[in-house]
Image (cartoon, rainbow, N blue to C red):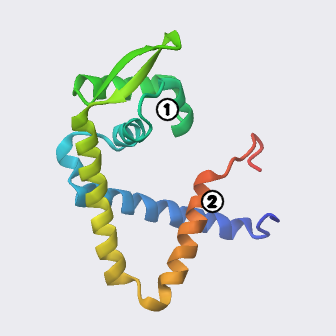
Amino acid sequence: MTPNPRPQQSGASAQRLNDAMKRLRARLRAESGQHATGVTPTQLVILASVVRQGPVTAARLAAQEHVSAQSIAQSLAVLKAAGLIHSAPDPNDGRKKLISAAPSATELVDKLLAGRAAFLARAIDQVVGPGEREDMEKAIDLLERLADVELGADGR
């Protein structure tokens, strides 16, 4: 792909996208009842990863979520204190710990994610017209590509 020839336009689009995503994330937290759980957005992302992947190391979680080992350790400590996760020695490498989700964590994640999905489905039905559905699918594809992009140290 060729770089965008209009960096000013890209910068403005980036700011609008960032603002829209922040507002949507806040709305999803409110609509799903996440505020009442006391689980932060970062903790929920980490907890959902542990639920989906089964036993996983903290290092793998940090790499996946693009955060530091220290940040993961802090979140895991809070989740462990809340009884949502537990750790056990890795049977293949006793120096490592495998993090697993408690059954209550699975229930919590399922409830919150279902609440988010239900809100989005209702919002899509209300806001996105039949002629816009294809555009929305294209936008989702673009967002997924943005989420997956790996930029080098020079930003390219």
Local crowd at mark 2 within 10 Å, few (<14), some, or many (≥20)? few
Would residue 107 appear left or right of 5 to someone viewing this image?
A: left
Residue closest to the eye, 109 or 88: 88
Residue at coordinates 66% horizontally, 66% vertically from top-left?
10
Where in the figure is residue 129, as x and y percent of width and height? 41, 88
Q: Position of residue 137 (x, y in %)?
A: 53, 75
Residue 52 drawn above or below residue 89: below
| Kind of residue indicated by mark 2 | Arg
Q: Residue visible at 66% across and 52% down?
A: 149
Please report the residue visible at 25 percent of the width from the left and 59 percent of the height from the top: 115
Name the disc covering residue 119, or none. Answer: none
Instruction: Name the residue nearer the viewer: 4 or 77.
Output: 77
Outermost residue, bottom direction? 131
- CA–CA distance in space, label 2 to label 1: 21 Å
Query: Picture quarter containing residue 152?
Result: top right
Which residue matches tag 1?
61
Is residue 84 found left or right of 13 in the rendered image?
left
